Amino acid sequence: MAVVSGACCLIRRQAFVRLGGFVDEFFVFYDDPDMGWRALIAGMRVVYCPEAAAVHGYEFGRRGKHKWFLLERNRLFQRSGRTTKDALSCSLSPLLIATELGLLGVAAYGGWLPQKLRSYASVFALRKRLMQQRRTVQASRRRSDVDVLKLFEDRMDSALLPPPGPALANAVWVPYMRLVRLLLRLTSPRSGASR
């Protein structure tokens, strides 16, 4: 398991403190996958308990278009290379750029393109904080990108993308992710290396 939903999760206080807590810039959206990813990098376990049940009174459209700005800004902040080493960041760059171009089209189609564009400006304004965060996260690293990627799916699935978006995206995404995994395994000194 890589990440769990912040709508219902528990984290040991010691682990929370060791990871530096939640990232202030997130406030809402993406704080949970970011915490999970940082925990994995630091060598901790993220566990899913299927017996647990929670009722979460959440309405996706409640925050209006500002929600899209927050979602996109926080997704970009989280995917900005803070949590990956340079080899993985470089390997994923073409796929991430293609994804961004696709999301620009989805944003234009969905009527939230201004919020999407504003998210780029916001992340650029946070660039010093991003670099600071990158140093902190990488200093906590106890697990290689190869080992972290083993916990992630090759497919990109989203209920937010209208058909045939996911199928088209996965025609490229799946083989590309398999290639990235193979290249990282071949170039990594050894699996499980801490740095």
Image (tube, helix red, strand yellow):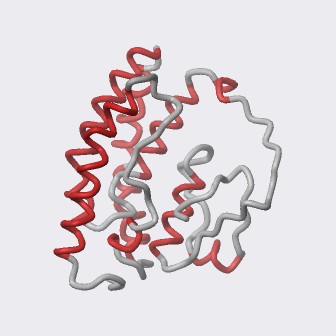
Side of 38 where 127 appears, left or right: left
Picture coordinates of residue 117, whole percent (x, y): 37, 27
Looking at the rendered structure, the number of numbered marks drawn on it comes to 0
Q: Is residue 72 above or below residue 189?
A: above
Side of 72 where 17 appears, left or right: right
Picture coordinates of residue 53, whole percent (x, y): 81, 53
Side of 120 where 95 appears, left or right: left
Q: Is residue 79 above or below residue 42?
A: above
Residue drawn at x 40%, y 33% is 166
Identify which residue, 156 or 95, lies in the foreground. Answer: 156
* Quarter residue 123 falls in: top left
Residue drawn at x 55%, y 65% is 1
Side of 40 where 57 appears, left or right: right
* Quarter residue 91 falls in: bottom left
Identify which residue, 170 or 123, lies in the foreground. Answer: 170
Quadrant including the C terminus: bottom left
Picture coordinates of residue 78, whole percent (x, y): 44, 52
Q: Is residue 119 above or below residue 140?
A: above
Picture coordinates of residue 50, whole percent (x, y): 72, 60
Residue drawn at x 35%, y 55% is 128
Residue drawn at x 53%, y 49% is 25
